[in-house]
Image (cartoon, helix red, strand yellow):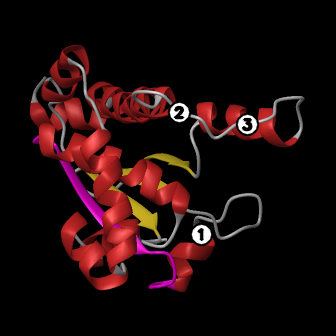
């Protein structure tokens, strides 16, 4: 699968939402984006990235999990000059959708992080571990969600940290790559 070609056809955040999202979808994504808090430590880590990362996010503007997670990626891309983020609608290129299926399903969001020259580095999706833990507690555990929320959403902070760890892992793979170290002389 040529994920670099898919990345090149992808859209920047606002264009993706304008093309594929209804006003209710755009509003939901904006609300989450406005709530994303990146700590000083997280911001410093993002700014220390030295290798370019092309991030392809297969998403659906209509998707609740995408609305909860994709704005985090956009916030990171705005803070880290080495992250080039593009969004691709789940159904835009069926070959990409099928190549990124999870457990036999057409799940989103799914992210593929590529090196500067288009080699796949990391693939991650569709939900963070904290989100799966929360869903498991609600659906197979004894927990009974109340829907009551006070203050900031602790789940969002967990998702921010988990997505940052995915990006940091990719950055370290790129930073330690013998091929790229030779190319960049470091």
Q: Above or below — where is 84 with respect to 157?
A: below
Estimate the x, y position of residue 29 in percent, counting from the top left.
35, 59
Image-based side of 171 in relation to 91, left or right: left
- Disc 1 to disc 3, how far (Cα)? 35 Å
Q: Position of residue 32 (x, y in %)?
A: 35, 49
Quarter residue 117 falls in: bottom left
The residue lying at 48 percent from left, 26 percent from top is 154
Q: Is residue 13 above or below residue 119?
A: below
Q: Secondary structure under badge 3? A: loop
Mark in front: 1 vs 3: 3
Give the residue pinned by disc 3. Answer: 145
Q: Nearer the viewer, residue 120 or 14?
A: 14
**Badge 2 local density, few (<14 within 10 Å), some, or many (20+)?**
few
Looking at the image, which is closer to me, 166 or 172?
166
Q: Label 1: how many residues lie within 10 Å, few (<14), some (14-19) or many (20+)? A: few
Does residue 18 appear left or right of residue 162 in this picture? left
Closer to the camera in the image, 31 or 21: 31
Q: Which numbered tag is attached to residue 63?
A: none
Would residue 83 be counted in the magenta stretch? yes
Q: Which residue is mark 2?
A: 149
Which corner quadrant of the image does residue 175 belong to?
top left
Question: How far separated are the C-alphas under marks 1 and 2?
Answer: 37 Å
Q: The residue tagged with tag 2: helix, strand or loop?
A: loop
Residue 161 colored in magenta in the image: no
In the rendering, which numbered label is found on residue 99?
1
Q: Position of residue 105 (x, y in %)?
A: 72, 67
Label located before the other in sequence (1 or 2):
1
User: Mark 1 or 3 closer to N-term?
Assistant: 1
Q: Disc 1, disc 3: CB below 8 Å?
A: no
Q: Which residues are magenta?
A: 80-93
The picture quadrant where one finds residue 41 is top left
């Amino acid at each position: 699968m040529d994920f670099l070609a898919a990345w090149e056809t992808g859209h920047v955040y606002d264009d993706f939402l304008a093309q594929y999202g209804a006003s209710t979808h755009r509003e939901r994504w904006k609300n989450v984006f406005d709530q994303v808090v990146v700590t000083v430590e997280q911001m410093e880590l993002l700014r220390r990235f030295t290798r370019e990362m092309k991030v392809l996010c297969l998403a659906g503007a209509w998707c609740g999990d995408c609305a909860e997670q994709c704005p985090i990626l956009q916030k990171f891309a705005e803070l880290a000059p080495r992250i080039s983020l593009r969004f691709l609608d789940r159904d835009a290129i069926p070959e990409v959708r099928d190549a990124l299926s999870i457990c036999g399903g057409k799940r989103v969001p799914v992210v593929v992080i590529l090196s500067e020259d288009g080699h796949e580095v990391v693939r991650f999706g569709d939900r963070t571990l904290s989100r799966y833990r929360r869903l498991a507690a609600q659906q197979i555990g004894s927990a009974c969600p109340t829907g009551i929320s006070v203050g900031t959403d602790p789940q969002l902070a967990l998702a921010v940290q988990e997505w940052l760890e995915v990006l940091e892992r990719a950055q370290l793979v790129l930073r330690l790559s013998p091929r790229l170290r030779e190319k960049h002389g470091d």
